[in-house]
Image (cartoon, rainbow, N blue to C red):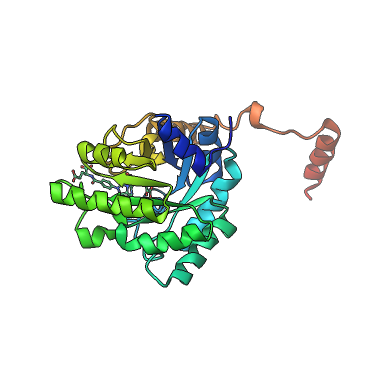
Amino acid sequence: MKTITVKTLLKMKESGQRIAMMTAYDYPTAKLLDQAGLHVLLIGDSLGMVVQGNATTVPVTLDDIVYHTRMVVRGAEHPLIVSDMPFLTTHGAHEDVLAKAGRLMQEGGAHAVKIEGGKELAPVVARLVAAGIPVMGHIGLMPQTVHALGGFSVQGRTVEAAERMLEDARALEAAGAFAIVLEMVPAEVAEWISGSLRIPTIGIGAGAGCDGQVLVFHDAMGFTSGYIPKHNKAYATLADTIVSAARNYVQEVTDGFFPSEAQTVHLKAEELDKLNSSAAQGD
Ligand SMILES: Nc1nc(=O)c2c([nH]1)NC[C@@H]1CN(c3ccc(C(=O)N[C@@H](CCC(=O)O)C(=O)O)cc3)CN21
Ligand SMILES: CC(C)C(=O)C(=O)O
Ligand SMILES: [Mg+2]
């Protein structure tokens, strides 16, 4: 399997090949998702919800994303590694945004960053791109604005809203973004935007007309005890597997069946004799 670059993704769109992206937050997961052939791994700020247990992505810090990116980079050899810019990190002076994106690349080892926002962020996107930082856009539902929106809801439900979304997408493309995530958008709108851009769109809750798809790892693997968004498809039932395995372990420990001989190390006979005689002498 070959290494995926931002150029590969553009060529995939040109040749009608779909892009498969998933979030990853740690080394073992990245290694397995690489082995499975994922094209893009995202260190998403969704880790604030599925890993840290927060109600939103707002509390996630740049340090959190750097920390998780380092782990993913060590495990993934072939996929393109994209790291989310957390809440507020894209809204300062351009120099500050550059420094923050730079940390994700230099300390984290990311190949690209992802930014939530539309045309208002086009200037800073152009600035990052000019510095050699590939940028993935993210429009539609932008979870970092959840408190302003009042919830995680579908965006672009009217023609006016859809037209504004296309304007945002075009501005990001013109600023040099190499791909754009469309989150929670009606399928018809996402397909229309996808057909209007040269760069690939990656959908989540945005129908089958996007150039690629992204899911949150824990949702896709059924590795969650909480709420699962309705756009999700669980391809495995890890939560059930873990609970039943852990129950089994508790049972075997309490019953004294674990550890058995297979998991046990014994003293050599000679040392055992010495131990027994020491024990007999009471020291
Ligand atoms: N586990 C998880 N999965 C995700 O897909 C995800 C995260 N976390 N965290 C960051 C964002 C937030 N996302 C979300 C969160 C909630 C809904 C949600 O409640 N959806 C409603 C439908 C809303 C509507 O129809 O307007 C649902 O019923 O599932 C959707 C996307 C997507 N991302
Ligand atoms: C859902 C994807 C696109 C994301 O931004 C995340 O996982 O944080
Ligand atoms: Mg995110």
Q: Where is residue 222, by image quadrant?
A: top left
Rendered location of residue 199, percent (x, y): 39, 43
Rendered location of residue 200, percent (x, y): 38, 40
Rendered location of residue 244, percent (x, y): 41, 31
- Quadrant in the picture for the N terminus: top right
Q: Which residue is pictured at 54% across the width and 38% down the height?
A: 4
Q: Horizontal placement of 205 versus 88: left or right?
A: left
Q: Is residue 62 visible?
A: yes
Count of residue discs: 0
Q: Where is residue 204, by image quadrant?
A: top left
Query: Of 229 and 3, which appears nearest the observer?
Result: 3
Q: Horizontal placement of 77 versus 42: left or right?
A: right
Query: Of 148 and 266, which appears nearest the observer?
Result: 148
Rendered location of residue 246, percent (x, y): 45, 35
Q: Is residue 264 above or below residue 6?
A: above
Q: Which residue is pictured at 53% across the width and 50% down the height?
A: 111
